[in-house]
Amino acid sequence: MYMEDINQLYREITRRAKANGVVDQEGWDGIVDEVVEQFRTDGEISDDDETPGMQEDLRARFGEYEEVIREDGFGIDSAG
């Protein structure tokens, strides 16, 4: 269940981050907190779902998001 939940959260975080033009870790972390809190409020995840650990795992996936937006040509200049 944890992997299913975290992947659902990651997809939503990625969607929102793209929509908001997020290109840095700070912005990503803010979206992670926002989405996790919304899912908790909506009852899609519970406190039993190890939310703090889940948030840390999602924050750590910023590198994956960077690759996605780089491939999409969105926001990050791969030339450095």
Image (cartoon, rainbow, N blue to C red):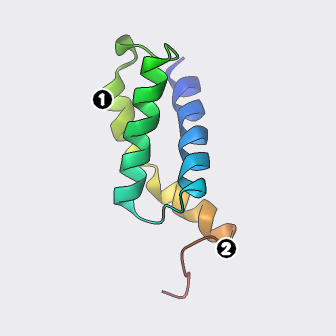
Quickly name the residue at label 1.
52
Q: Quadrant of residue 69?
A: bottom right
Please say if 23 is above or below 8: below
Percent x, y for residue 46? 41, 13
Element at label 2:
loop
Asked if residue 75 lies left or right of residue 61, the reply is: right
How many marks overall? Answer: 2
Q: Amino acid at mark 2?
A: Gly
Asked if one can make out residue 38 in the rendered structure from this viewpoint, the answer is yes
| Residue at x 57% of width, y 34% of height | 7
The mark nearer the N terminus, 2 or 1, is 1
Q: Quadrant of residue 79?
A: bottom right
Percent x, y for residue 37? 40, 28
Give the Cα separation between the discs numbered 2 and 1.
32 Å
Which of the pair 73/17 is nearer the observer?
17
| Residue at x 48% of width, y 24% of height | 39
Quickly name the residue at label 2.
73
Give neighbour class at mark 2: few <14, some 14-19, many 20+ (Cα, 10 Å).
few
Q: Amino acid at mark 1?
A: Pro
| In the image, farthest residue toward the left | 52
Element at label 1:
helix
Which of the pair 56/75 is nearer the observer?
75
Percent x, y for residue 61? 46, 49
| Residue at x 43% of width, y 20% of height | 40
| In the image, farthest residue toward the bottom | 79
| Residue at x 48% of width, y 86% of height | 80
Give neighbour class at mark 1: few <14, some 14-19, many 20+ (Cα, 10 Å).
few
